Image (cartoon, rainbow, N blue to C red):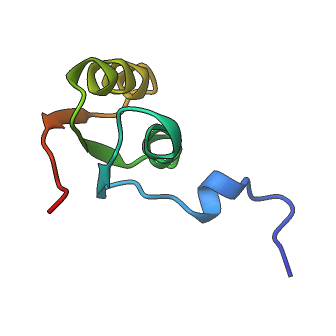
Amino acid sequence: MSEPDVPVLERFSLAGKVALVTGASSGLGAGFAVALAQARADVVLAARRRAGLEAVSREIEKLGRSALAVQTDSTP
């Protein structure tokens, strides 16, 4: 049973947590990174494309969260 008076992001608060998102420069990775920041997590962004990382980082910082962009290739 849901709690109708409690907003979804309050039920899933990530305040005080740090999330690591790979593929964070675009698409699903960028979307997940922003969603985690909306849930109050600080986010480490990892991807190959620096420009995309910087754009997502700015979006997260506009939400009042910290973002660290790391250009890397995590493929084997």
State left or right for residue 70 relative to residue 58.
left
Quarter of the image for the N terminus: give it. Answer: bottom right
State left or right for residue 29 relative to residue 7.
left
Q: How many marks?
A: 0
Residue furthest out toward the front = 76
Comparing 47 with 57, the one in front is 47
Could you say where residue 73 lies in the image, as x and y percent from the top left?
A: 15, 46
Comparing 39 with 19, the one in front is 19
Could you say where residue 18 lies in the image, as x and y percent from the top left?
A: 27, 54
Q: Quadrant of residue 67?
A: top left
Could you say where residue 2 lies in the image, as x and y percent from the top left?
A: 83, 74
Residue shown at the point (19%, 57%) measured from the top left: 75
Could you say where residue 69 lies in the image, as x and y percent from the top left?
A: 19, 33
Residue shown at the point (61%, 56%) measured from the top left: 10
Residue shown at the point (44%, 33%) measured from the top left: 26
State left or right for residue 44 relative to residue 3.
left
Looking at the picture, does residue 22 appear above or below residue 27?
below
Comparing 1 with 46, the one in front is 46
Quarter of the image for the C terminus: give it. Answer: bottom left
Q: Quadrant of residue 57?
A: top left
Residue shown at the point (49%, 48%) measured from the top left: 32
Q: Quadrant of residue 30?
A: top left
